[in-house]
Image: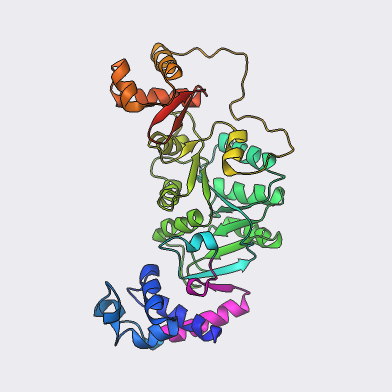
């Protein structure tokens, strides 16, 4: 029975040393969570890379008792349990090697609807807020669901704009359903469910919003979508980890560039600089790269063309003209031709990208716009 498999899946996942990758090995070897629960301790030698210490806690009756309580909690609170090895986890997420063995879900997820993950700092600026508003306005006629982390700042704005523009939105939590963090977003979480969205977590009901859970949560945010947009983030911000997961999963990453003096843009600028994200120059280009149909609404460019002549510095002008005359020139070749070290050229190229004069490609190649 499927209900029995849910019981043993929860108990197995509660066992110490059994993370998502080991869980997957167990059910792949023994065919089900129930069989793994009953056979793993005796037959652990069938498991590649797993020793007796890893399976020592499997079969602990306390985990079965907890699993029984968890099933009752989920039934009482209208929480759906989605098991990976029963093919219940969203398709794109299931492709990730470290996908969660179990997901707990409130509300609805349309698995066939394209997902777009949008993340960023809790300390959002008016620049980031305007971008999010412009993006949702421009994609009003496109069909997709947004994904974010229900934090304050960018996440909150993404969920709210989704609701305002009648887009389903998925909030991925870093804790179990006995809690709601941050508490300020409780009404928002209720609104998400009322408007056809969902709350999603891999953590059982008793798991609190511990610090280490947030990075773990970010891999789900990245894994659910073919593309992640980083709006604003500082050096080492949580959104940088989301971008790193997306890169590991071979997903597209886009970052909103900003002034090099703006703390909230420094993480985005670094992602772009190190070819970990594509710079967003216009909303129109972003929508095209996301594969959306051209919306009927008029799309304003983030950095619109004007007749105002941009006055470049001498170094900017030299590099710009050389790139213009040598399309798709590499960084190494550029450094050799103009006799400047690459570490001095890169900040200038980033400035030119922000001015809308240059565009970078993978392999550190550049063209003039």
* Residue at 49% across, 33% down: 257
Q: Residue furthest right?
A: 296
Give the color scheme: rainbow, by chain, secondary structure or one colour. Answer: rainbow
Left or right of 325, for residue 55: left
* Residue at 41% across, 63% down: 98
Q: Is residue 143 above or below residue 208?
A: above
Left or right of 266, for residue 355: right
* Residue at 55% across, 45% down: 154
Magenta span includes 41: no
Magenta span includes 82: yes
Q: Nearer the viewer, residue 27 or 67?
A: 27
Q: Is residue 257 above or below residue 147?
A: above
Q: Nearer the viewer, residue 76 or 305?
A: 305
* Residue at 48% across, 53% down: 222
Q: Give the total number of marks visible in the rendering.
A: 0
What kind of secondary structure does the magenta stretch mostly adopt?
helix
């Amino acid at each position: 029975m499927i209900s029995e498999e849910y019981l043993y899946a929860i108990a197995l996942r509660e066992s110490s040393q059994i993370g998502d990758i080991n869980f997957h090995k167990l059910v792949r070897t023994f065919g089900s969570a129930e069989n793994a629960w009953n056979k793993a301790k005796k037959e652990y030698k069938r498991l590649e890379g797993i020793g007796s210490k890893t399976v020592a806690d499997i079969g602990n009756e306390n985990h079965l008792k907890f699993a029984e309580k968890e099933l009752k909690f989920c039934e009482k609170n209208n929480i759906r349990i989605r098991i990976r090895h029963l093919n219940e986890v969203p398709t794109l997420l299931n492709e990730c090697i470290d996908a969660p063995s179990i997901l707990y879900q409130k509300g609805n997820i349309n698995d066939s609807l394209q997902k777009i993950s949008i993340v960023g700092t809790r300390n959002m600026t008016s620049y980031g807020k305007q971008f999010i508003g412009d993006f949702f306005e421009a994609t009003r006629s496109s069909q997709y669901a947004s994904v974010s982390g229900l934090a304050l700042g960018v996440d909150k704005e993404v969920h709210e704009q989704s609701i305002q523009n009648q887009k389903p939105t998925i909030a991925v939590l870093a804790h179990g359903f006995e809690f709601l963090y941050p508490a300020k977003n409780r009404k928002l979480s209720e609104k998400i469910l009322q408007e056809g969205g969902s709350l999603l977590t891999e953590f059982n009901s008793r798991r609190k919003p511990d610090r280490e859970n947030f990075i773990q949560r970010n891999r789900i945010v990245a894994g659910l979508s073919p593309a992640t947009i980083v709006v604003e983030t500082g050096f080492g911000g949580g959104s940088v980890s989301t971008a790193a997961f997306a890169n590991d999963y071979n997903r597209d990453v886009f970052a909103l560039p900003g002034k090099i003096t703006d703390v909230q843009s420094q993480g985005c600028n670094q992602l772009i600089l190190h070819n970990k994200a594509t710079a967003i120059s216009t909303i129109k280009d972003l929508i095209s790269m996301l594969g959306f149909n051209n919306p009927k609404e008029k799309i304003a460019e983030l950095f619109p063309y004007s007749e105002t002549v941009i006055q470049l510095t001498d170094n900017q002008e030299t590099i710009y003209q050389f790139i213009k005359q040598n399309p798709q020139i590499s960084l190494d070749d550029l450094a050799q031709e103009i006799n400047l070290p690459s570490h001095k050229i890169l900040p200038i190229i980033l400035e030119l990208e922000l001015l809308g004069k240059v565009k970078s490609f993978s392999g550190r190649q550049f063209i003039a716009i």
